[in-house]
Amino acid sequence: MGNATVHDVARIAQVGLATVDRVLNNRGNVSAKTVAKVQAAVAQTGYVRNLAAANLARQRVYRLCFVIPAGETGFIASLLHAIEAQRAALIEDQVLVHIVQTRAFDVAGQVAALRGLDCDAVAIMVSEAPDIQDEVARLRSAGVHVLTFVADLPRSDREAYVGIDNVAAGRLAGDFMGRFLHGAGPVLMVAGSLAARDHNERMMGFRQVMQERFASLPLLPAMEGADDAATVERLVLEAAQAQALGGIYAIGAGNRGLVAALRNMAQRPVTIVHELTPTSRNALRDGLFDLVLDQDCTAATATAIKIMRDLIEGREIPAEAGKIRLNIHSRENI
Amino acid sequence: MGNATVHDVARIAQVGLATVDRVLNNRGNVSAKTVAKVQAAVAQTGYVRNLAAANLARQRVYRLCFVIPAGETGFIASLLHAIEAQRAALIEDQVLVHIVQTRAFDVAGQVAALRGLDCDAVAIMVSEAPDIQDEVARLRSAGVHVLTFVADLPRSDREAYVGIDNVAAGRLAGDFMGRFLHGAGPVLMVAGSLAARDHNERMMGFRQVMQERFASLPLLPAMEGADDAATVERLVLEAAQAQALGGIYAIGAGNRGLVAALRNMAQRPVTIVHELTPTSRNALRDGLFDLVLDQDCTAATATAIKIMRDLIEGREIPAEAGKIRLNIHSRENI
DNA sequence: TTGTAGGCGTTATCAC
DNA sequence: GTGATAACGCCTACAA
């Protein structure tokens, strides 16, 4: 079971080592006859290339990059933490991970970041804008593999998307909201920005289910909290003063503000939020939040890294590969 | 950025290659003075070993094994599928994964399987019995790394557990059951076997939450369906005939039987089950099941493989490493 | 206690 | 078109 090597293949095919290499990596300049001989020998021996040896010989280093928003939300912190946690093992495997942080919603800054990249593959979490899509196309044509991360750019040239299905997430939130509420008060949605595809899709999914299955529950117009705690707090309190809220679906960041608002509200609405962070974890424990929908940052970063490596190696990426499962946390499983 | 090599370290420390190797892999027989010199050079150059080169030189092949139950439950099928899906990439990385299937609940057979193992590390999903724990100890002392998989053996010598927290899973199921039911009828629990730790822990968690927070809901004695569809169907129908059921928590396999029973019941109870398979997926879609709790097989196998490799490499395994997140599926996100 | 000389499996550079 | 031959970075005899 000591796997066959190129030497074995060369010997059996009765050709030189270089020829075997030319066939295996189809570099051309080999006669059809010889190609056939080599392929036969490969089939006969069950040869499988030793990636470690190959990478050693070509001195390959995988230069990967993450472009993600700067800012102090708990979610970004988890992301960074997850990447750091893997770094030690990665570096031994010759994969260098570089992180570039950009201001959220600052398209020009994100474009500049993408332009300044020097790597083999990049996972980007950026705004959806024409300039960005152009930049993705440029990267691709420069031979850089690009995948979108957490927030997709479906119309772009990206080769994969790693993240959750945000419509499904919203639908799930809607389903739970409807079941938990069973009939009471109006429901408030607080997004970060409805221009952001991920937030928009979550809202859409949520709204769909509420209309399809819980039409009796009034749905207030969605608010935009800009992922900012103070803004979120103010918006929620204002809404609660106008009328007693039955439920709140917090689509984006700014959960600290939501917690502050809830503490000041006479009656506690059913509250469903996104992203498990220290803030949301504590709020779950304290009974302020009912459910936290969470994309597993460790899984997301690990998947992104694996897909980037596979892309660089020219392996097939199954369509499902980037799908991150959605986790749900209640006070019972934190 | 072309990382420092042993040659660089040797040159700077003014010692031979072999000495550097001895220090790096602390094989002893090096004077304290020399050790210090080498370590200084390592620090200065920021040397990090190239694992690929190291493995190439020692011709290391990772021989991994999974010991899992035979049987045609959808869960086992998913597990096998997940392992197969990764095999191609793994083999290029010199990791050979072997699968051994044993009859469920057949302790003697499982012990025999463990005894026949020839590998560097193994992930085992087996019954909890003294003989098995002895066998784990024997494997460990024979230098084989052992981790438990899906079902833990907490009292054994295993070095890690990869799987979900079953108590938390049961608690979560209980929480949802209570909230969905809001007040109606008695709740039936159907386990596979209460002697199996995973089922037992789920039941415990479920029961805890029901008693703590939804004490008004009567809880029927737990039934054992032996993971067998026909048995499950019969038990559920009998219970339903005795009294109208408000909810059903299906802790183990045999979901096909549960579906059959539900189709023959006048009134549909709130139904929460485990493991997302074609059967449970269809039942969700058809509105027969309300929730499916699921451990992501792909994540579980990938994590197990990663931890086995880390164990073999002697890397630190963080306590949290084997924790698989619990996914929840409703009809809205399948 | 220390150093030298292969060799691991692949790729790249030359000649032929 | 094809085939030797020398790297790549590390480990491991064996020699000193």
Image (cartoon, coloured by chain):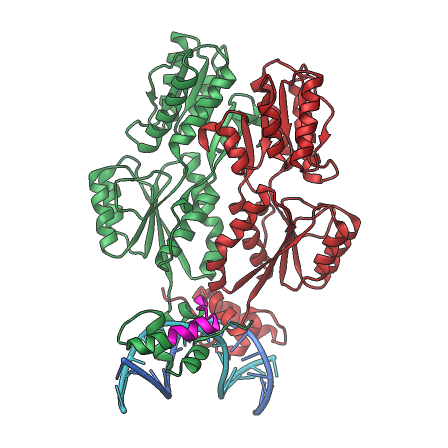
Chain colours: A green, B red, C cyan, D blue
Relative to B314, does residue B11 appear above or below in the rendering? below
Residue occupying image coordinates x 62% and y 72%:
B27
Where residue A94 appears, as percent x and y from the top left, is 42, 62
Residue occupying image coordinates x 37% and y 21%:
A207
Main secondary structure type of the part rendered in magenta: helix
Depth check, front residue: B91 or B9:
B91
Quarter of the rendering containing residue A230: top left
Residue B39 makes an appearance in the image: yes
Give the position of the C terminus of chain A as an image quadrant: top right
Where residue B196 appears, as percent x and y from the top left, is 72, 40
Q: Which residues are magenta?
A: A38-52
Depth check, front residue: B106 or A313:
B106
Asked whether, in this view, residue A131 is left or right of residue A225, the answer is left
Residue A168 in magenta stretch: no
Residue A45 in magenta stretch: yes
Residue occupying image coordinates x 53% and y 52%:
B83
Depth check, front residue: A129 or A32:
A32
